[in-house]
């Protein structure tokens, strides 16, 4: 038997479920001598802790008996922070205790409290619930805690962060003093230690996190993108990795709606989960994800805990998490119980410093990369088709009449072409996105972080664009335009010379190759930029404004109908770009290079 120290009935359930050996946290709680001890356990998300505490409480509930006799009061209480986690715990305990005759009831918000009260009245051996709903039932007398033999606090750190300390104390104070108390938490912070000291007796401290690499089964990647192209970049990331199931996290409910709408429009079967949804809606969404009807779940952090989908190989953070703990809990939806997973952080290029700080606080290493291009995705599609099990397992010996008919009617090349066409037809369309550099900025951080000004390097290559005095060209909006199209910073631009019908400008030697690659990927309707020889002279003799011509070029009054030029009839030379974002005067006194304006960012 793979778990020799477990109750025989639970051991058989583990074997039937395919468990071959315990995870570290399961092995730790099964050590001899812990059968009657309180436990204070720190374990990562996805480490198998639900099965761990299910095994740990078995000696207290069953003893030497094979089955549990009927009980008027619950024998065990499991408290979880969210409805999803509570339902997940209930599901795990049901198969683990299937042969013991244990009745397991749930008490969670968003469901019919009267039905829960009836289930409790009929008798339940184990009750799983969220703090608020459990306190409601206890206060109304429908939940009798006087017969409890053990209490489990699952993800206690999260419950304290959510403000449930009073509810936890109410439930623990109402439980018998001689009960066992098992406390599971990702970290043992001061508040957790204080709670353990008050409600546990001679607790055994078990640490399965210290010294272990954070989420060792998860590969972290950071995808650098333009701020206004998050949704389009997200499409390419989903297409590149092509996970059977993926979860996309957003920081707000509004963004959840926007992202899901964009995915549905592009042909992704997706569902959404956010705080304002009822429990039935959320349960249906999760079930469609588990059954394969939906491939992408877009969610707020309310879904960061308690969802366990076996085929979930990819987690994408469409919004940068607000804290390192959030990053880890979101990412922990994949790479569970020994399975491999990928966590992708979408990083707008003007928020790279913030992302780097977040990764450092979470103590995880990430690979930085650009948004997958259409060519890279096409190569992945080709490899996936060639390795598809349908082709690999197809037998040449067949009696299928249709197969034989097709083989007789068409040659192999035509059949292969039809197969490729059918395969591609079911795939969502790839977005054409301008490549972005993944190099870390050396001297300029996010908005508001200015590096000391260095001497401007004037050695570089010249370029020209078909915009000049006729279009009211002015460095005030030309510099942001060059920064955006070429993925460079203001410091990378040398001299600018504006002539009647075109403008010449310099790009420093160290940025030339990146500038060329980004300009080559610009959209067809962008202003044309091409290499040039050094102009003979005239125009502006550097980035500084010619004092005698400041009024002439500083306040364009009309014209300029091309994309990237000043608005017709507008002042200030604002750039009107995709998604409504634009350039205007930067708060730092110059362009940020990423379309910062007083308008809402995309």
Image (spheres, helix red, strand yellow):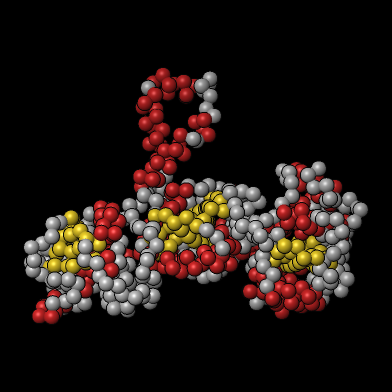
Q: Nearer the viewer, residue 272 or 458?
A: 458
Question: Which residue shows up at 73% across the image and 56% down it?
Answer: 25
Up-down: is 515 above or below 147?
A: above
Up-down: is 425 above or below 310?
A: above
Q: Nearer the viewer, residue 235 or 492?
A: 492
Left or right, 198 with respect to 530, comes to: right
Q: Residue 51: in sight, yes or no?
A: no
Where residue 420 sits, quadrant-wise, is top left
Measuring from the top left, give residue 510's x and y in whole percent.
29, 59
Measuring from the top left, give residue 137's x and y in whole percent.
75, 73
Question: Which residue shows up at 65% across the image and 70% down it?
Answer: 158
Question: Which residue shows up at 69% across the image and 70% down it?
Answer: 188
Measuring from the top left, give residue 365's x and y in whole percent.
52, 58
Up-down: is 335 above or below 15?
A: below
The N terminus sits in image quarter: top right
Left or right, 497 with respect to 442, comes to: left
Question: Which residue shows up at 42% across the image and 54% down it?
Answer: 369
């Amino acid at each position: 038997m793979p778990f020799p120290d477990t109750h025989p009935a639970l051991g058989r359930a583990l074997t039937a479920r395919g468990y071959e050996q315990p995870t570290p946290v399961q092995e730790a709680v099964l050590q001899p001598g812990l059968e009657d001890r309180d436990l204070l356990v720190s374990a990562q998300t996805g480490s198998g802790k639900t099965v761990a505490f299910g095994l740990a409480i078995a000696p207290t509930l069953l003893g030497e008996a094979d089955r549990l006799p009927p009980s008027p009061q619950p024998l065990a209480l499991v408290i979880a922070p969210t409805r999803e986690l509570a339902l997940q715990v209930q599901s795990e305990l049901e198969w683990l205790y299937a042969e013991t005759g244990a009745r397991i009831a749930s008490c969670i918000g968003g469901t019919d409290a009267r039905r829960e009260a009836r289930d409790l009245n009929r008798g339940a051996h184990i009750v799983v619930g969220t703090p608020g709903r459990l306190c409601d039932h206890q206060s109304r007398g429908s939940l009798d805690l006087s017969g409890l033999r053990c209490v489990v606090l699952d993800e206690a750190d999260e419950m304290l962060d959510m403000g449930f300390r009073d509810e936890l104390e109410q439930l623990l104070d109402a439980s018998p003093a001689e009960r066992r108390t098992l406390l599971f938490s990702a970290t043992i912070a001061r508040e957790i230690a204080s709670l353990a000291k008050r409600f546990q007796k001679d607790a055994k401290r078990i640490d399965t996190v210290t010294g272990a690499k954070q989420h060792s089964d998860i590969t972290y990647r950071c995808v650098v993108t333009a701020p206004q192209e998050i949704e389009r970049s997200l499409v390419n990331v989903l297409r590149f990795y092509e996970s059977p199931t993926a979860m996309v996290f957003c920081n707000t409910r509004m963004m959840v709606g926007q992202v899901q709408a964009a995915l549905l429009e592009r042909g992704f079967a997706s569902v959404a989960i956010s705080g304002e949804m009822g429990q039935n809606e959320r349960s249906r969404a999760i079930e469609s994800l588990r059954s394969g009807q939906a491939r992408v779940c877009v969610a707020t952090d309310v879904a960061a805990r308690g969802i366990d989908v076996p085929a979930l190989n990819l987690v994408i953070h469409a919004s940068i998490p607000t804290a390192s703990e959030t990053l880890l809990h979101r990412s922990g939806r994949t790479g569970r119980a020994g399975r491999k997973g990928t966590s992708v952080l979408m990083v707008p290029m003007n928020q790279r410093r913030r992302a780097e700080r977040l990764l450092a606080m979470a103590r995880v290493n990430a690979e930085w990369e650009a948004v997958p291009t259409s060519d890279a995705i096409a190569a992945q599609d080709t490899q996936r088709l060639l390795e598809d099990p349908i082709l690999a397992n197809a037998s040449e010996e067949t009696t299928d009449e249709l197969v034989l008919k097709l083989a007789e009617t068409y040659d192999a090349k035509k059949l292969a072409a039809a197969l490729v066409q059918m395969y591609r037809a079911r795939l969502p369309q790839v977005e054409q996105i301008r490549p972005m550099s993944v190099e870390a900025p050396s001297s300029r951080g996010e908005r508001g972080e200015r590096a000391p000004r260095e001497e401007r390097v004037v050695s570089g290559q010249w370029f020209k664009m078909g915009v000049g005095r006729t279009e009211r060209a002015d460095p005030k909006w030309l510099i942001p335009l060059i920064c955006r199209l070429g993925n460079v910073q203001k410091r990378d631009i040398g001299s600018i010379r504006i002539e009647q019908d075109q403008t010449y400008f310099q790009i420093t030697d160290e940025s030339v190759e990146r500038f060329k690659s980004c300009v080559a990927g610009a959209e067809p309707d962008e202003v044309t930029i091409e290499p040039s020889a050094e102009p003979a002279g005239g125009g502006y003799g550097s980035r500084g404004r010619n004092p005698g011509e400041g009024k002439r070029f500083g306040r364009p009054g009309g014209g300029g109908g091309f994309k990237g030029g000043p608005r017709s009839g507008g002042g200030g030379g604002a750039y009107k770009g995709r998604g409504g974002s634009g350039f205007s005067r930067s708060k730092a006194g110059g362009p940020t290079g990423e379309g910062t304006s007083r308008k809402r960012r995309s």
